[in-house]
Image (spheres, rainbow, N blue to C red):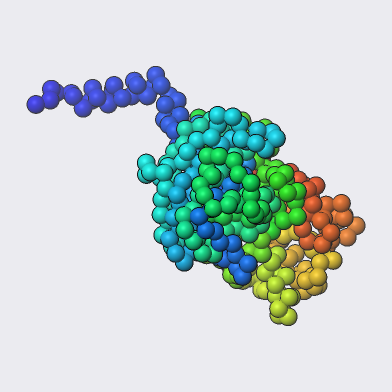
Amino acid sequence: RRPPGYRLMKLLVLLVGWLLCPGVAAATPHWIGSWGASPEPPGPQAHSFSDQTVRQLVRISAGGDRVRLRISNAYGRRPLRIGSASVARLAGDGADLPGSLVPVTFSGRPGAIVRPGGTRLSDAVVMGAPALSRLSVSLYVRGQTGPCTCHAIAVEEAYVSPPGDFTRRPFTPVETLTSRAFLTGVEVRPARSGKVIVVLGDSLTDGFQSGLGADRRWPDRLAARLARERPDQAWGVVNAGISGNRLLGSGYGEAAPLRFGRDVLAVPGVAYVVVSLGLNDIRHSRIAGLPPPGVGDLVAADRRMIAQAHARGVRVIGATLTPFEGESAYSPGGEAVRQAVNRWIRDGGEVDGGADFDAAWRDPGHPSRIRADLQAGDWLHGNDAGYAALGDATGLSLFRSGRVSGRRD
């Protein structure tokens, strides 16, 4: 039988311990997303692999002392058989840092089977991976994969081996890709507290026409600013852009509200989502010879995602739609819809903050056009300077280090 006052004494001991070590709870290790590439359904030119190793390069945002990989077979028609995997840090010249290569396991085994429609998370890999470091991830797949669950626009090269397991040795590529294959996430365990910003967007977020292998997408710029200017905690920036993606229709990836749970809310540590979508809905209606979409329909799609985010305590940052006069799908009616959506983002009071991409890109003398020095030649996408301007237009004051409530203050 416990003595009288036992419970009170136990509570006092716990309270004294907490007072003497106030940082213990905050320092508890946890996992956060540090890099991502949203999976897409295979298209007519989808890649497939047969007993080959695919080596892919990524730049993480937040750093940590442990790393794990997320592998997706979301759109596969047959089991994905991973024979082995490895990860290494890259030096400035793009080669693996000597001694940094570490084998990756899955539930303690060197390989794994990922069922059709499934996702598999690797075991933790003990390795120091500082913020903004570049990693090399190698996956050896056994047998025929069929059309892969890929991400079409990587703006980075991936290397395909001849037949065999080359996860721990160099090889001469038989093919070079500019897409992602099966790898959809890199997660880290930071040494201190961390939060994640997921950027849900289209080709502007994907970094289409930015410098190959240069990490010049605008979310890359945001990640670099956070690492430099907000070192109070680890900040993960996960890119969930899909080129061509829309709010109202699927085709280039599933419509944004349909993939919101998988690509945003399922990311560990997510505290904020930046939504940069809607321009493709306006453009595609013109391409299809239809009237522009209704402003109410676009806003309703945004509201669905806002409700999902707020229910999980995730704050929503709305990015205004950028100018596009001069592009082939421009129309005065579409411009009117763009302006109306931007007024709702700025003044509607339903998002938790705004990033004014329209103001960052518009030509002061011709506001329906992008400034000539910021566009990539098609009057729709940015060049490297244009994407840097979007990254700088995303104010760091939008992202706080404290508790996230999911409501506007």
Which residue occupies 54% across, 44% down? 166
Residue 280 visible (yes or no): yes
Using the image as rendered, state which of residue 52 and residue 133 is in the foreground. 52
Which residue occupies 51% across, 41% down? 86
Q: Position of residue 181 (x, y in %)?
A: 57, 55
Quarter in which the N terminus is drawn:
top left
Using the image as rendered, state which of residue 175 and residue 234 is in the foreground. 175
Using the image as rendered, state which of residue 396 and residue 3 is in the foreground. 396
Which residue occupies 50% across, 35% down? 102
Task: Give the number of marks.
Answer: 0
The relative height of residue 216 versus residue 14 in the rendered view (above or below) is below
Which residue occupies 43% across, 31% down? 28
Residue 200 visible (yes or no): no
The relative height of residue 153 versus residue 286 in the rendered view (above or below) is above
Side of 336 where 220 appears, left or right = left
Tell which residue pokes out farthest to the left in this image.
1
The relative height of residue 199 versus residue 116 in the rendered view (above or below) is above
Res. 88 image quadrant: top right
Q: Position of residue 301 (x, y in %)?
A: 58, 66
Tell which residue pokes out farthest to the right in this image.
365
Res. 41 image quadrant: bottom right
Side of 394 where 362 appears, left or right = right
Res. 339 image quadrant: bottom right
Q: Position of residue 186 (x, y in %)?
A: 53, 44
